[in-house]
């Protein structure tokens, strides 16, 4: 009896060793991310988006933010991205991604690049100041910049997103709706948004060549995008069979490991090095 009571008290009033370890690890990861941003250890990994009709031709690249620890190793995004979405740290990550993307655009005049951002960063003064400062220095950068906003993020504040996009489209910036079809979009908003590109969520791409449910859903999403004159990209394409089915179905572009993994070394630099050699 006495032993059982003591066990119940521990369960009710104390953290388990596992919970404590997880919380300690998470706090440590957040601190590493903050310190990395302070050091400027945030870089982009570049992944190609290719034309479905001719996969040897690259339409644009996506720049995916990578945060490095003191040893130069990448801190896994899954360890912190979800936790920082509603924090100022998430806004600072968006600022770092934007700076790195604009720098790459300035250094490579023929590059077209997409950068991820949260709708929460729309009202973050530092993010807007960063964008304005770079575009004031070189307004033509806007014509090659694509801003990706996730479907779930956009739907948290659709009116604000619509106003924001309307203002920046006048500068020539392109907008992409990321993870389209993941379940958050109220389709009535599509006629009000200014998205030029929709990136169809990878759950509909997986085994699409042999999954009749995914085929129906993919065809429907392509049709919706076409109705609103939006360019389509299929995410997470992992094999040739998926790519072939998607191209036949009318998708515009393809992205995934089948065509190239995200690379910290810009692929156009690697290509130039191979050519020089």
Image (spheres, grey):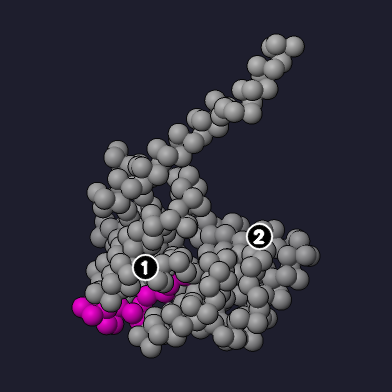
Distance between mark 2 and mark 1 Cα atoms: 31 Å
Instruction: Give the crowd class for mark 2: few <14, some 14-19, many >=20 residues within 10 Å.
Output: some
Residue drawn at x 52%, y 80% is 159
- From what the image shows, is residue 273 above or below residue 244? above
Q: Is residue 32 shown to the viewer in this render? A: yes
Residue drawn at x 65%, y 75% is 186
Tag 1's secondary structure?
loop
Q: Image check: 17 left or right of 69?
A: right
Residue 86, position in %: x, y?
47, 58
**Is 53 contained in the magenta span?**
no
| Residue 24 lies in quadrant | top left
Q: In this rendered view, identify the residue nearer to me: 234 or 58.
A: 234
Q: Which residue is mark 2?
A: 203
Residue drawn at x 55%, y 32% is 19
Q: Residue furthest right?
A: 212
Question: What label does residue 166 carry, if any?
Answer: none
Q: In this rendered view, identify the residue nearer to me: 25 or 173.
A: 25
> Is tag 2's residue or tag 1's residue first in the polypeptide sequence?
1
Residue 55, position in %: x, y?
51, 69
Q: Image check: 207 left or right of 58?
A: right
Q: Quadrant of the N terminus?
A: top right
Question: What label does residue 124 carry, if any?
Answer: 1
**Is 143 contained in the magenta span?**
yes
Principal SS element in the magenta part?
helix
Instruction: Give the crowd class for mark 1: few <14, some 14-19, many >=20 residues within 10 Å.
Output: some
**Residue stretch in magenta:** 135-148
Residue drawn at x 51%, y 30% is 20
Question: How many callouts does the rendering have?
Answer: 2
Residue 247, position in %: x, y?
62, 73
């Amino acid at each position: 009896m006495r032993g059982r009571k003591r066990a119940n008290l521990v369960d009710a009033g104390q953290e388990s060793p596992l919970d404590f370890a997880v919380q300690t690890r998470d706090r440590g990861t957040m601190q590493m991310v903050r310190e990395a941003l302070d050091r400027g250890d945030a870089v982009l990994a570049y992944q190609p988006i290719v034309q479905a009709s001719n996969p040897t031709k690259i339409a644009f690249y996506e720049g995916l933010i990578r945060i490095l620890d003191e040893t130069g190793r990448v801190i896994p995004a899954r360890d912190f991205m979800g936790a920082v979405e509603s924090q100022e740290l998430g806004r600072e990550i968006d600022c770092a991604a934007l700076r790195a993307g604009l720098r790459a655009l300035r250094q490579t005049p023929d590059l077209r690049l997409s950068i991820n951002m949260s709708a929460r960063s729309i009202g973050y003064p530092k993010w807007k100041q960063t964008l304005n400062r770079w575009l004031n220095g070189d307004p033509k950068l806007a014509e090659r910049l694509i801003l990706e906003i996730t479907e779930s993020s956009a739907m948290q504040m659709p009116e604000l997103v619509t106003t924001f996009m309307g203002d920046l489209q006048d500068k020539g910036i392109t907008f992409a709706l990321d993870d389209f079809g993941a379940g958050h979009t109220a389709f009535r908003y599509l006629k009000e948004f200014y998205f030029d590109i929709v990136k169809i969520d990878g759950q509909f791409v997986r085994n699409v060549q042999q999954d009749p449910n995914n085929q129906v859903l993919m065809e429907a999403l392509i049709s919706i995008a076409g109705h609103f004159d939006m360019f389509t990209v299929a995410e997470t394409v992992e094999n040739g069979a998926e790519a072939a089915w998607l191209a036949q179905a009318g998708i515009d572009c393809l992205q995934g490991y089948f065509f190239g993994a995200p690379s910290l070394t810009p692929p156009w630099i690697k290509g130039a090095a191979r050519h020089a050699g």
